[in-house]
Each structure stands twice: as C-alpha cells, then as structure tokens.
Image (cartoon, rainbow, N blue to C red):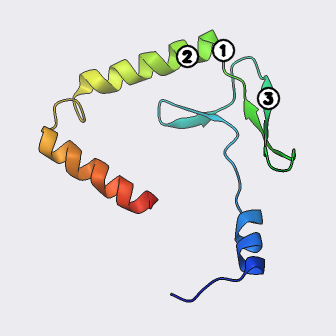
Amino acid sequence: MSELSHKDWIGKASAIRFRDKAFIDGKTVAARSGRTFASINPATGETLAEVASCGEEDIDLAVTAARRSFEAGVWSRTSPAHRKEVLLRLARLLR
C-alpha cells in the first residue's frame, strides 16, 4: 500500500460523514424530542455534526429493543467461542 500524502489524508477526512441519529432497534432515528447537540472537533472548535440529543424516552426504547434482542437468543445463546470469533473479527475490521 502506498503512502498517502497530507493532502490525501485531508481529502479522506473531509469525506467522512458523521452519523447524527441514534441507532435503536436496528434503525437510525432522531431523538423523540427532536433535539440535537453539536459534536465539536476539540482541535478546531468546528461543529462536526448536530447529533440526536436522546432523553429518557429514547433510552427506554433502546433498552426495550435490547432486551427483546437478548431474549431472542441470537447473540446471548451463542457459544462464548463464537462470540469471541465475531468480536475479534470486528476488531480486525476496525483496525
């Protein structure tokens, strides 16, 4: 893999689009209140995105969805060895 120039990195960084919604029950959704807050780049003070400002109602929806998913057993009843394999693969992809 060839070395990227500073200009290349700036181009790649500027192409990143930040998610601005919550991820609840397999979907990206705005906060129920409709409120957002600014996610700020601490190095520049630039606003990166206006992000969903989730509250108690959003948390209740997320916890209910997570409980339903857990009880369905797709992940919770999977063997520890399989979960390890999946998480290690995710870590490799992130790196």
Q: Amino acid at mark 2?
A: Ile
The location of residue 44, given as percent across then percent down, is 86, 50
**Residue pointed to by mark 2:** 59
Circle 2 or circle 3, nearest the eye? 3
Kindly identify the residue that appears in the image at 70 percent across and 40 percent down: 20
Tell me whether the residue at label 2 lies in contact with that at label 1, contact meaning CB atoms closer than 8 angstroms: yes
Quadrant including the C terminus? bottom left
Q: Does label 3 or label 1 sit earlier along the sequence?
A: 3
Residue at mark 2 to residue at mark 3: CA–CA distance: 17 Å
Query: In the picture shown, does residue 69 fall above or below 45?
Result: above
x and y, in percent, of residue 36 in the image: 78, 28
- Sequence-earlier tag: 2 or 3: 3
Residue at image coords 47%, 30%: 25
Against 71, residue 60 (above or below) is above
Element assignment for label 3: strand
Q: Which mark is residue 37?
A: 3
Instruction: Where is residue 55? Give x, y as percent.
Output: 66, 14
Mark 1 crowdedness (10 Å alpha carbons): few <14, some 14-19, many ≥20: few
